[in-house]
Amino acid sequence: MLLTERSRQFLSLSVLNLRSDRIFSVSNSEEFEKIALEVFRYQVSNCDVYNRFVNNLGIDIQKVKELYQIPFLPIEFFKNQKITCSMDPAEVVFSSSATTGLNRSKHYVQDIGFYIQSYKTAFNIFYGDVRKYAILALLPSYLEREGSSLIYMVNDLIGSSQKSDSGYFLGDFDLLKQRLQELKDSETPTILIGVTYALMDFVERHSIEFPDLIVMETGGMKGKRPEILRAELHQLLCAGFGVPRIHSEYGMTELLSQAYSKGSGIFQTPPWVKVMVRDMNDPLSLLAYESTGGINIIDLANIHSCSFIATQDLGKSFPDGSFEVLGRFDHSDIRGCNLLVQ
């Protein structure tokens, strides 16, 4: 049954116990599950779309006592539904990139502070203090449109960097090559964040030997180039930049958190994010570790929309909490971050 108004009012008070400091300080699986179940109860009572989805599945929310029992909302709902737990206007609305003619996903963010704390805390976990890095960005397709959550994050990282050399580079590959050489010569820790096709465009025109450079691809050719195998792509980028490995960022409009790979396409999540893999033929069933299926993501930072999302990515999860992206479901639109053919 749909929750009564009285139940909604009672359960909405639970958000008072779901402060950002509690979410971003998760330290073990037991604590994660406890908070995730609280978030589920809050969202199923306050997000009308998620409530109807769970109700239509015939799930008795009172019997959802364990993590694996929580249903995941198909990510397609973000294209034509307003997924929110609040009637108040959103502080920010993020929108996805999309192939011409396809609907864009929209994420109505009620409290941008959750997103800021999420990406800053995760960056610090995986890479340390951003102030020590020069942050260079090669993200032309994202800058050409409004509403990119990736650009919001990169803008802040560039602003937080204490290196004056930080900034965006569009089509000026000569200037980027010069900047990289200067940063190499000065032994400045440097991260180059780039959309895949732009990084490929750069290494076809220039090469540099910068072994300490962190090259972080955000994935996706955006229709600019044919998709290629990740191993082949990384081999070409490693040769062009003179680095031993290529890092990757995994994120999407519908999430408020990122996962990172420091090589080999194996992603690690921050403690408030968990990846589970579903059966492709029975989407309500979860698979064992190292089995290939659809990627489900729990992102506790999505407190004001939906934290339980069934993506259109295919992959595997591993016992240590890491995961691998293997591709996408057939007929799903190619967009977002890190959607490379394996």
Image: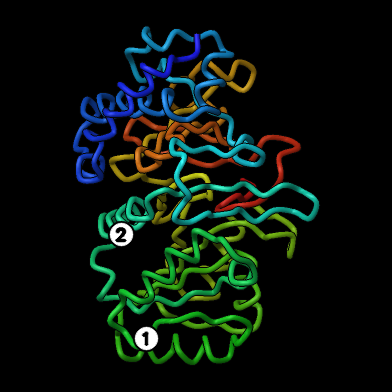
Provide residue 143's location: percent of width, then percent of height. Answer: 59, 71
Considering every residue shown, the one lying at the far front of the view is: 6
Residue at the outermost right position? 101
The C terminus appears in which quarter of the rendering? top right
Marker disc for residue 184: 1
Residue 246 shown left or right of residue 123 in the figure: right
Disc 1 secondary structure class: helix
- Asked whether residue 230 is in view, the answer is no
Judged from the image, the secondary structure of the residue bearing numbered disc 2 is: helix
Residue nearer the viewer, 13 or 72:
13
Q: Amino acid at mark 1?
A: Lys
Residue positioned 40% across, 41% down in the render = 302
Towards the viewer: 221 or 335: 335
- Compare marks 1 and 2 and give the one earlier in the sequence: 2
Asked if residue 333 is positioned above or below residue 281 in the image, the reply reads below
With 249 as the anchor, is 171 left or right in this view? Answer: right
Residue 329 % position (x, y) = 67, 35
- Residue 120's label in the rendered image is 2
Mark 1 neighbour density, 10 Å: few (under 14) some (14–19) many (20 or more): some
Please give the count of numbered marks on the rendered protein: 2
Indicate which label's residue lies in the foreground, 1 or 2: 2
Residue 24 picture quarter: top left
- Give the residue drawn at x 48%, y 49%: 89
